[in-house]
Amino acid sequence: RRISIQMAQFIAAAEITLEDIAAKDADVQKLITSKSFVPALLRSLENTPLTTKSPEVKAANRDVVFKALESIGDKDIGDAVKGVCEAGDEALDVLLKYVYLALATPRPPLADGVEGSAAEAVLLEQKKWSTSLLKWHPLVVEKTGPGGIVRVMTDRKTVV
């Protein structure tokens, strides 16, 4: 598989720092505020720290991508996937990695000691998050084909 220059922007060439992620977060937040959801998602996927060993950097980037994913309404998911598809195969693979990570990560997390109606509210939010992610998955896989799943599952460069 060839990696074009366009695709290379989604793989961090140099070590990414927390300051880089903070700058990306500010850009994404600005785009979300201006209702530019697809550009916000694309920006969140740029320079993904796949090769870093720092769990803090990966967690910070994960939160930025999750923020962009959450900002996109269910009716706009198809347009968002189309926008990522135009950025190239590597961008779709990175998006699929984050969809799988999001499915494995309860959001928002259930804090210890939370009970009753507060816990039910958190569980309802988690259900909405998972339902939304399950709409992303088939649309991304439709673009990548089954090879996208194989690449994501076998790639040693992870988003976790």
Image (tube, rainbow, N blue to C red):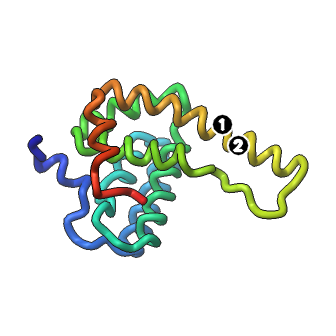
Label 2: element kind: helix
Q: Residue at x 27, y 73 (%)?
A: 15
Please provide percent x and percent y for residue 147. Answer: 25, 33
Marker disc for residue 128: 1
| Whether residue 40 is visible | no
- Residue 66: percent from the left, percent from the top? 51, 50
* Disc number for residue 102: none
Tag 1, which secondary structure? helix
Q: Are marks 2 and 1 in contact (CB under 8 Å)?
A: yes
Q: On the picture, is 89 further left or further right than 127?
A: left
138 in relation to 49, above or below:
above
Figure check: 83 above or below 60: above
Q: Is residue 138 above or below residue 66?
A: above
Relative image position of residue 69 (x, y in whole percent): 49, 44
Q: Which residue is pictured at 62% across the width and 50% down the height?
A: 106
Say whether residue 47 is left or right of residue 5: right
Give the amino acid type for the residue marked by disc 1 in the picture: Lys
> How far across and down, in percent of the image, does residue 103 sit?
53, 43
Quarter placement of the N terminus: top left
